[in-house]
Amino acid sequence: MFSALMTTKRFAPVFWVQFFSALNDNFVKNALAFLILYKLQVEGGASLVTLAAAILIAPFFFLSGVGGQLADRFDKSTVAQKIKLAEIPVALIAATGFALDSVPLLFGSLFLYGCGAALFGPIKYGILPVHLEERELSAGNALVEGATFLAILLGTLLGGLAAAQSGASLMIAGGIVGLAALGWLSSRYIPLTGSAAPNLVVNKNPLVSTIELVRDLKSYDRLWVGGLITSWFWAVGIVSLSLLPTMMKDVIGGDEGVATSGLLVFTIGIAIGSAIAAAASKKGPNLKLVPIGALLMSLFALDISYITATLPAATETIDAWTFATTLTGARMLFDLTGLAVAGGLYIVPAFASVQAWAPDNKKSRIVAACNVLNAFFMTTASLAFAFLQSQGVGLTPLWLTIGASNLIAIGLIIYAWGPEIRSSQS
């Protein structure tokens, strides 16, 4: 099914738009992290890196409502093209930031990238139920998630290399602008969808539209629960990714290559977990995988907490090969991979179910409402962990918090979604 979807016009352009867009903003975010931690060595760098993740996600909270209404009111393909065209000047701002080693400019571009992603989110996930059959939704979501995390992987690798090089400003600037142009060109091939709600009046007030969106989602019990369940995954994911570079540098004593290797296996793990979830959901989203994924996420996070608690303080810098060939390093990489695989098992069937259950004339707005919840969970978690780090809380209790709170989430998921889990078919 994967190969069939990737060769059809009703899906492939969406995949490539998402890939190029996610590659661009993750390149900027990860290059900024390496710039702060390794090149500029900014004071309070760990909390700034976590704050960068919050800056990228925050626009989802107040722009998703407008994005969902635009996607249902107008043709989704046309709106996507306009959003991606607007990201080209944003790329120019980011390019200037790298040329000047300007952290404020890069933070500003991250915020603007987040605005574009918030508006595009309801479109990309709203298009899938229009052009794909229900049995194809899990595979389609797995591929979109795969595009996202492949982009994170490449953005991490390229971001680390870029931040470590001197005199590469023009190449970096050209790459950023080029990726934005490729995203816009890909959007021009997305098939037309027509208007799902041609009489819908778009409320351009971000606050009012967001409140209306969330209130509407709450009127559908299982969709509301689904939004909360998917939001939990994104909160755990963004905090884990934010802690990863700091853990590899401060606890392991690793160089840029060690930090990159951790992000690498995390990204590969998400892709593997998403593929497994899609393969186990041939007749429809297999919700039995959701509590299983949550349990495994807990176990791997708790083991990472144990490793950080028992490691002696790093006395020298090590490279990626040295790290990977030690027993502790191999165990850490295994845990990170397992955490990510479990995340893929969790999110793919959970979100595919929300898409399938949403009314046809409200699919984009339902997705947008879920994005609001996702943004609230991710921003709140990022800011909370950034505050704890700024107060001197170490990585061991932070990873312990992730693992323990996830155990609580398992019980809530089974309680709230029990009938759906028992009746779901693979």
Image (cartoon, grey):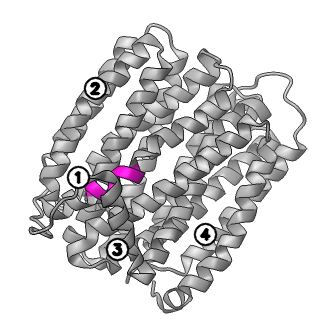
Choose the circle earlier in sequence order: 4 or 2: 2
Q: Mark 4 packing: few (<14 Cα in 10 Å), some, or many (20+)?
A: many
In the picture, the disc for residue 293 is 4
Question: Residue flagged by tag 4: what amino acid is it?
Answer: Gly
The C terminus lies in quadrant:
bottom left
- Percent across and percent down for residue 376 are 50, 56
Residue, disc 2: 177
- What main secondary structure does the magenta stretch of the protein show? helix
Task: Give the answer, above or below, for where 290 lies relative to 110.
Answer: below
Residue, disc 1: 204
Residue, disc 3: 216
Q: Secondary structure at mark 2?
A: helix
Cα–Cα span, label 3 and label 4: 29 Å
Q: Mark 3 packing: few (<14 Cα in 10 Å), some, or many (20+)?
A: some
Q: Secondary structure at mark 4?
A: helix
Choose the circle earlier in sequence order: 3 or 4: 3
Q: Mark 1 packing: few (<14 Cα in 10 Å), some, or many (20+)?
A: some
Cα–Cα span, label 1 and label 4: 38 Å
Q: Which residues are magenta?
A: 60-67
Work out whether residue 255 or residue 396 is closer to the camera in this orientation and state it: 396
Choose the circle earlier in sequence order: 2 or 3: 2
Q: Residue at the location (59% across, 78% down)? A: 413
Question: Residue flagged by tag 3: what amino acid is it?
Answer: Asp
On screen, residue 334 versus residue 96, left or right, reads: right
On screen, residue 176 versus residue 185, left or right, reads: right
Q: Residue at the location (29% across, 66% down)? A: 365
